[in-house]
Image: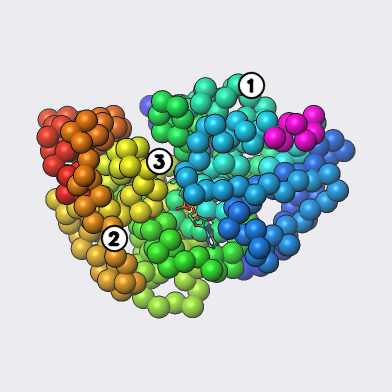
Amino acid sequence: MYRNFAIVPRIIFGRGSFNQLDEILAARRTSDGGMVFILDDVFQDRELRGRVPLHEGDRLLLVNVDDEPKTSYIDALVAEIKAGDSRVPAGIIGIGGGATLDIAKAVALLLTNPGSAADYQGWDLIKRPAVYKVGIPTLSGTGAEISRTTVLTGPEKKLGINSDYTLYDQIVLDPELLAGVPTDQWFYTGMDCYIHDVESLQGTYLNEFSKAYGEKSLELCRQVFLEEHPDRDDKLMMASYFGGMSIAYSQVGACHALSYGLSFVLGIHHGIGCCIAFNQLDEFYAEGVAEFRQMMAKHDIRLPQQVTAGLSDDQMEQMVTVALGLAPLWENCLGKNWRELMPRERARRLLSRM
Ligand code: NAD
Ligand code: ZN
């Protein structure tokens, strides 16, 4: 059986395209609720905040992403929006990195689906269409702008709300918005994309669809991280989009599985966690890891060392359990007999090197 999946239907790309946001939203403004803009609070005192096209009845919510998004945070934001206005908003517009894009997706879903965000962590549990939603990345690499998931940490698990309703209705890809990202963060989030490509292209699930997007994304990542180009932000924005499209029809692999363990037990963020894990995975992705180290050297990136060193036996075992729980990722990486190839001891040995 082949998956019949939805994609984002409307995309605007180009430097300054953010200026057309007001026009894009105009068609969606109805007589009832206003627009709710969800903006990463890093922009609190920056020029972008003043460029948000607010009309009477609209709201601007600043969100904090020091921690990766939790289901409780989504529930609180939804309650705040409902308390401010009993009408359903005409739209939700998320502006920020992967975390903010995920928050905006989840809020739009929970405004029309009853209960807590935690009730919907899993696959296709959402039953009703979300509020109209627009995603505007200010940091590129995760592919969250085009994915059908919003990754949330709940009381019991870190798992996405995966559904066709999770997809944005519109994305605005304006490379100018990437200006001002600190180098480390730019690198870690960009490497998320590079790793998506490597894991997709070396996976057993690979097909021409994923390959077409993955190869182009990888080529763009090489231009961005190993060469000098004045339009590197444009390139990275498209690399992220294509990397996301590549894994949509295949899967990620060992690096993502192990990084979920790091993230769950140590609270390490996605991009940097993927880098810490990937740096120890020569035995799976020799060429990719060698090239990744070249990229690190070029940008003078120093990864945290020995992050798992002080952990207890229980914590190590918990990390192994989380990592090995991601069966499709291991199957993509190692094939159907992955369980024999990746016993708990081997996963633990890999994690203990990180
Ligand atoms: P992020 O959204 O967590 O942001 C990282 C930091 O960069 C934050 O401090 C943020 O305020 C700051 N920032 C963002 N844009 C900036 C700008 N233009 N200038 C200066 N600072 C800026 O980072 P991320 O790596 O983009 O996203 C990681 C999140 O994405 C995780 O929560 C992860 O679970 C999620 N994710 C989702 C998907 C998906 O498909 N939905 C895929 C991968 C990762
Ligand atoms: Zn990723």
Residue at which label 2 appears: 303
**Does the Cβ of the disc 3 residue fall within 8 Å of ligand 1?**
no
Where, quadrant-wise, is the N terminus in this rendering? Answer: top left
| Mark 3 Cα shell of 10 Å, populated few (<14), some (14-19), many (≥20) | many
The residue tagged with tag 1: helix, strand or loop? Answer: loop
Q: Amino acid at mark 1?
A: Pro
Q: Position of residue 145 (x, y in %)?
A: 53, 49
Q: Amino acid at mark 2?
A: Leu
Label 2–label 3 contact, CB within 8 A: no
Q: Position of residue 131 (x, y in %)?
A: 68, 35
Q: Amino acid at mark 3?
A: Tyr
Tell me the magenta residue range.
80-86
Q: Quadrant of residue 220?
A: bottom left
Per the model, the C-alpha gap separating discs 1 and 2 is: 42 Å
Front residue of this view, candidates 263 and 256: 263
In the image, what residue occupies the spot 68% across and 31% down?
79
In the image, what residue occupies the spot 68% across and 66% down?
47
Residue at which label 1 appears: 114
The residue tagged with tag 2: helix, strand or loop? Answer: loop
In the image, what residue occupies the spot 60% across and 42% down?
104
Q: Position of residue 350 (x, y in %)?
A: 17, 44
